[in-house]
Image (cartoon, rainbow, N blue to C red):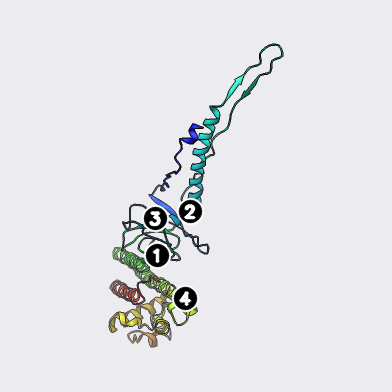
Amino acid sequence: MKHLDNLDPQFSISIPPDEDGFVGRECPVPECESYFKIQLGTGLNGENLPCHCPYCGHAAGPDKFFTKAQVEYVQSVVMNKVTGALLKDLKSLEFNHPPRGGFGIGISMKVSGQPTPISHYREKQLETEVLCEQCALRYMIYGVFGFCPDCRVHNSFQILKKNLELVGKILAVAETQEQAVAQSLIENGLEDCVSAFDGFGREICRLHAKRSADLEKAEKVSFQNLEGAKQSTKLLFNLDLSAGITTDEWKMAVLAFQKRHLLSHKMGVIDDEYIPKTGDTHTAVGRKVSIGTEEVRAIVKIVGKLGGYLFDAIGHARS
């Protein structure tokens, strides 16, 4: 059985990356088992570095994050090598003794068969690719938000900044369009800005809900109304949301967020609640709210500052 004997007692089998250079990973926690991908050669350098699940944050050695498909592939490669060697050894034992004489009996042995086939697989398609600002790891996840698998920094603030950059690009396009199209783009830019901050704020509160005064309420905080969000963060996290920016910036942001509410729910027409909530006495009920490019640009900067303050104040979203 020389072919079997010549096999190494241990096998070294590489996991092939997909066409974009990403390798699949799967959280070992039974309640999670979520799939993500990382690009080898990016991120932290060093030995014995843990891997983190982007979804639940669980940390363990990289060897604990192999996917089921990868394990099946590795097992099939081993079985292919073993059965291939075994077949070669058995083939070497083939013989054929033909019958002799009038009543002779012949005997032979012939081996047939193929090595166990290799179970090939393809990595899954995911929705969001992230380049971690902290450690430069490239990774892909389902959804939008997640922990970096290398350094465990949460990407929520990074995603907010990317969305705000997109708003800036929308405003740049608006300046090249005719008035009606430009106004629509400006209004869409404001809505995208508010939506980005709302999604970011909700994710931060969800991550730290266990540290809040009321876990259930912390997971449902809305940031589309800044005054309401200020009350909620004060109650739940003892955090003054408005402390992250100046008084004038806060007033400007509250005004813009209320304009976004009218654009989304009232076709931009001012209602009885708008003026008391904003203190905007330069307009009247029944008139259409106005919003310009420079105002939205200013709000983008304010929201960026407010997001950075919220991210830092609750602990860089590491828990």
Displayed quadrant of residue 45: bottom left
Which residue corresponds to mark 1?
147
Amino acid identity at mark 1? Phe
Instruction: Give the residue type that dot 3 points to.
Output: Ile
Looking at the rendered structure, the kind of residue marked 4 is: Glu
- The secondary structure type at the circle numbered 2 is loop
Does residue 314 appear in the picture of this structure?
yes
The structure residue drawn at horizontal position 66% and vertical position 13%, both measured from the top left corner, is: 100
Quadrant of image for the C terminus: bottom left
Labels 4 and 3: the sequence-earlier one: 3
Within 10 Å of disc 1 (Cα), the crowding (few <14, some 14-19, many 20+) is: many
**Vertical comparison of 156 with 36: above or below:** below
Give whichever of discs 4 and 2 has the lower sequence position.
2
**Dot 3: element:** strand
Against 100, residue 182 (above or below) is below
Mark 2 lies on residue: 67
Q: Is residue 86 above or below residue 99?
A: below
Other-residue count near label 4 (Cα within 10 Å), few / some / many at <14 / 14–19 / ≥20: some
**N-terminal of the two: label 2 or label 1?**
2
- The alpha-carbon separation of the residues under discs 3 and 2 comes to 12 Å
